[in-house]
Image (cartoon, coloured by chain):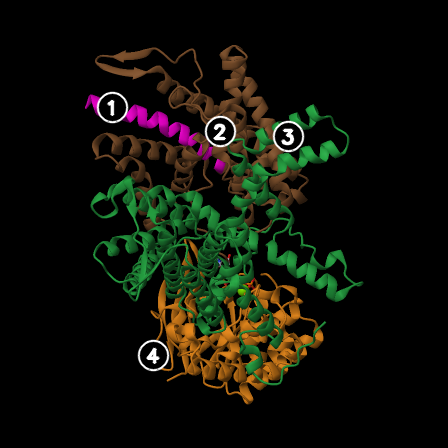
Chain colours: A orange, B green, C brown
Amino acid sequence: MSYFRAENLSLHFGGLKAVDAVSFAVEKGEILSIIGPNGAGKSSIFNLISRIYRPTSGRIFFEDQDITEEPPYDIAKLGIARTFQNIELFENATVLSNLLVGRHRHSTTQLWQELLFLPSVRANEKMHRRRVEQVIEFLDLEPYRDKLISGLPYGVRKVIELARALCSEPKLILLDEPSSGLNVEETDDMSFWIRDMKSELGITVLMVEHDMSLVNRVSDRVIALNYGRVLAMGSPTEVQQHPDVVAAYLGA
Amino acid sequence: MRFLFKTDYEDDIKLFPHSGYWVSYGILLALLLIAPYVLSSYLMSQLVFVCIYATVGVALLILTGFTGQASLGHAAFLAIGAYTAAYLQKYNVPFPVYFFAAGALTGIIGAMVGFPALRLTGIYLVIATISFALIVEEILARWESVTNGNEGMRVKTLSLLGVTVPRDSPTFYYLCLAVLVLTIVGTLNLLRSPTGRAFVAIRDSETAARSMGVNVALYKVKSFAISAAITGFAGVLFAHKLSFISPEMFTLQLSIEFIIVILIGGAFSLHGAVLGAIFIVMIDPFLTYLKDDVPGMIAGIAAAFGAGKATAGSIQSNVAAFASLNGLKGAIYGIIIVLFVLFEPLGLYGRWLKIKLFFQLFPLYKRATFKRQKIYVKSERNR
Amino acid sequence: MLDFVQQLVSGVALGCVYGLIALGFVLVYKATEVVNFAQGDLMMLGGFFAFTFIGMMGLNYWVGFAGAVAAMALFGMLAERVVVRPILGYPQFSIIMATIGLGYFLRSIAGMIWGTDDLKIETPFSQGVLRIGSLVLAYDKLSVIAATMILCTLLWLFFNKTTLGTAMRASSENMLAAYYMGIPVKRVVSIVWAISAAVATCAGVLLAPITFIHSNVGLVLGLKAFPAAVLGGFGSIPGAVVGGVLIGVIESMAGFYLPEGWKDVAPYLVLLAVLLLKPEGLFGHHVRKKV
Ligand SMILES: Nc1ncnc2c1ncn2[C@@H]1O[C@H](COP(=O)(O)OP(=O)(O)OP(=O)(O)O)[C@@H](O)[C@H]1O
Ligand SMILES: [Mg+2]
């Protein structure tokens, strides 16, 4: 059985088939990229997985469990974290508290304990703080710890979003266009981090990306999508040479 | 300027960023404790109201400031707390019991309001809370067997462990102060724990909060319940302070006053809620002062500048007539709100921070430091 | 049955007034995303202006009416310029507070100028009644209904048939895009305020024979018009009028058929029920941010 599996996933907005009977599988420890022209339905697949939308039909499995009907907040609890294409950070909070929200799925304390800030809460907080610091170190975010998000440049925010997802110690991470809006150097950093996530942290990565050089550098496999349908699936070079994919990108 | 060096994860968790805070808050607390022996009984009475309003302000801050759920219905929660106390008193229930019962009942009702409010945002939520408050007001006026209708209810003097605590005694003031301080400390604790962060996350992006594992519905209901419960506690004290309650004390006007508390004080800060409460409560004595003393003063000034006795007299009576005009209070309220929104969106606390920074950075302070970013039009339609 | 029709007509008449105030809410909201809590108070002020022109200065009813509308249109522009424009684009909460402040101010000032008594405006149609069989309908109520229909038609023509109206619709869809297309967005906004104040004035003057004019009338009616706008979806012009009529009818039916006390809460109960089932109101669209 595959680690993660989507079966015949469809999402219709009225007459528009944003996702149309898509099936694919992700193996544990793999980096799988989804490519496709604008509006192909890539983000929609992510939104289906994280249950922002309810699929019109189809099923989603993770670790052999059917998660199609799980409420959105339980998806994170199962170990699936994500980033967003247009950055969804908590604007009026510090970087640190943004990252600590990433720890939310590991919090065990009760409301009344928190009101009194009992030693157990304190101990938990220190533990979370330590974990967050590891992520900060991993992604070189030290200079920004106490800064408010609203004052930070785009590139940094992008990294913070990644950091927030990593703080939840996910098993599977969904990255929606991790390099969009980044310059060449930042994109390089991003590619190293993505590979390190796989090799050092053992996280499985599902990624949507337009930058082909990044896709080629990090992906084990690639899925090409157009009009909500899978065009091709396979190694990066295979997919890029597939006639349907070439046609889709040339706008035929 | 003070530079903070952090050497331990504790440093980010602590209640106050550095030890200076303990000193200044200690001094403040000491001053508040000796206040009953220094201040006039009138000012003490106002101080009690400040404590109650500030408690409600903090409660509203949790809901509106931190969780981002606007409410114009907090007067109703205050009323529920107050009426629960008054009703249970009739059956000789002891203070601690009805105090907590009032908080618990209000909290439960708050949660019940929170459920339908889950799917509402922005203006829809505002109108839903207004509707709730208006319905509560009507129930209070009509459910005569319990609330005594528009006649209102008398509230007996508080008796704690067999000792009576009159509403103008120092002990009552200490009680109100204790409730306020506990509320503030509890809120600070919440803010440095997962729940508080979940609130802020919901305020800033529900989608992201959800995808990080926050059960948005649950936390919104929690926020409603906590905010309502605190307001309910404040309601008990409010009832005792007034010693008589009736439905027309808990109108939309009062809910708006609570919003003004957090707006004027400065949204998103606990300091602000307290400053705002001081402001709202003190505006009445200020207007009285205006009515009584200022006309004479102005006439005096006019006389000093060589105005004749008759002119000075007529100035005095004119100013006095203006000051005692009906509705002057409303006009001043209105102007103050508008001016604050236009020129001091960070509220009184924001102003204080600016002043502090000015002295710390002197002579390097630039006006632009706090200049607001002009966003042309940022739509809140698609939230 | 007769009672029912009579209640229905007076409910619809009252509802039309709510609808007109709600229309003001919606116009301003559509154009600027500002929820104007002072809308009811603009109506109140309009009523007082009309009273001054007609009752105190003795002008002809129609001349006074027109004068009040014109004066209030100017006042609406002024209010927008002074209170709203500087904070356009800031969080909704701040703007709501600013308009609440404006409302306080207007109420107090009106109280100072015109006193706290109930005032009445004599109208050409205050008296008579229309008899259809044994059904008796008062002209003042019918006039409100007729006037609302005329006003709505005029507004519809304005928004759909004139260039200015089209520009307004464009800038309410997307202000920034409209700005780039060369639409003078600021002027458009100030005209929207003028229109909404003018509509409010019409409501105030039409209302004068039914309930009286006093400084708190705006607050009281505004609190009913608000649910009307929400019921209609807060952004839909026909929705506002339909919402207003619904609220008016519910109120007058509850007042007639239910025990005392229900009259005042029934509209809010219905509103809460509707919001529970359809959080975006009857005619609103549910929009969701794309991620
Ligand atoms: N909430 C929605 N309502 C209606 N249509 C939608 C919605 N969300 C997405 N769509 C449509 O679904 C299609 C797929 O959108 P999606 O965001 O998944 O594209 P994408 O592949 O991520 O594109 P891009 O590369 O631009 O991010 C598009 O045509 C889009 O307009
Ligand atoms: Mg996308």
Residue at (67, 79) in percent of width and height: A188
Q: Amino acid at mark 2?
A: Met
Marks 1 and 2, Cα distance to the nearest angstrom? 28 Å
Q: Nearer the viewer, residue B194 or A161?
A: B194
Could you confirm whether marks 3 and 4 are on the same chain?
no
Q: Tell me which corner region of the image, top left, top right, bottom left or bottom right, holds residue C13.
A: top left
Mark 3 vs mark 2: same chain? no
Cα distance, mark 3 to mark 4? 83 Å
Ligand 1 contact, mark 2 (Cβ < 8 Å): no
Q: Is residue B334 left or right of residue B301?
A: left
Asked if marks 4 and 1 touch (Cβ < 8 Å), the reply is no
Q: Is mark 1 within 8 Å of ligand 1?
A: no
Label placed on residue C5: 1
Q: Is mark 3 within 8 Å of ligand 1?
A: no
Q: Main secondary structure of the magenta part?
A: helix
Circle nearer the viewer, 3 or 1: 3
User: For the magenta stretch, what is the residue range?
Assistant: C1-25
Q: Which mark is residue C43?
A: 2
Up-down: is B39 above or below C63? Answer: below
Relative to C4, is B244 above or below?
below
Please name the amino acid that badge 1 sits on.
Val
Q: Quadrant of ligand 2?
A: bottom right
Q: Residue furthest bottom?
A: A200
Whether residue B348 is visible here, answered yes or no, is: yes
Amino acid tagged 3: Gln
- Percent across and percent down for residue A56 are 37, 62
Q: Chain of mark 4?
A: A
Q: Secondary structure at mark 3?
A: helix
Label 3 sits on residue: B316
